[in-house]
């Protein structure tokens, strides 16, 4: 097999594509001393942007609430441009859904923590995420939904 046929994976660029912060209850919310309830949502999407070039965006949304009041809402779209060549089609989706988000997550984690800290709140450190398990859950759920659809048609 020649070098041109060898699988190739490289990171071309890592960047913050989108970032937003909302503190709807400011300044009164800063007088609260209770610990908020933290809700974390993760989403990743990958798309081809050229021959063997892909953009993956990992979106992390954090909502901190005290009772029914939102302390803050942070959303970070951490993105990367990746070169992926000579990879079988069936292996491309796991790379985009697992490997690329694993690379992007530490950057997103730092961006979220810095944003929350600069907003006047204590730093928020996100726990590591198992993107392979999340991917497997998504694939399993899609297969179950497809099987349920096939059963209802009969």
Image (cartoon, rainbow, N blue to C red):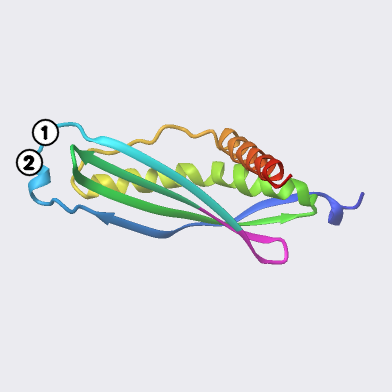
Q: How far apart in space, not on screen, are marks 1 and 2 (Cα)?
A: 6 Å
Please report the residue visible at 78 percent of the width from the left and 52 percent of the height from the top.
89
Q: Which mark is residue 73?
A: none
Mark 1 Cα within 10 Å, few/some/many (few <14, many 20+)?
few
> In this rendering, is residue 90 above or below 48?
above
> Which residue is farthest bottom?
50
Asked which secondary structure carries label 1, the reply is loop
Asked which secondary structure carries label 2, the reply is helix
User: Residue 91: image x %, image y %?
Assistant: 74, 46
> Which residue is farthest right?
1
The magenta segment: 47-57
Q: Which mark is residue 31?
A: 2
> In this rendering, is residue 79 above or below 108?
below
The C terminus: image quadrant: top right
101 on left or right of 96: left
The residue that label 1 is drawn on is: 33
From the viewer's side, name the closer residue of 51 and 130: 130
Quarter holding residue 30: top left
8 on left or right of 102: right
Quarter holding residue 152: top right
């Amino acid at each position: 097999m020649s070098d041109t046929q060898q699988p190739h994976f490289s990171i071309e660029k890592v960047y913050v594509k989108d970032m937003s912060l909302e503190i709807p209850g400011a300044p009164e919310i800063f007088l609260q001393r209770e610990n908020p309830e933290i809700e974390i949502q993760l989403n990743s999407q990958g798309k081809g942007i050229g021959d063997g070039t892909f953009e993956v965006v990992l979106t992390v949304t954090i909502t901190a609430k005290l009772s029914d009041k939102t302390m803050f809402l942070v959303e970070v779209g951490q993105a990367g441009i990746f070169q992926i060549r000579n990879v079988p089609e069936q292996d491309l989706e796991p790379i985009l859904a697992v490997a690329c988000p694993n690379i992007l997550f530490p950057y997103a984690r730092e961006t979220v923590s810095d944003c929350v800290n600069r907003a006047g709140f204590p730093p928020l450190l996100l726990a590591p995420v198992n993107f392979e398990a999340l991917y497997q859950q998504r694939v399993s759920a899609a297969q179950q939904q497809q099987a349920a659809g096939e059963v209802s048609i009969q």
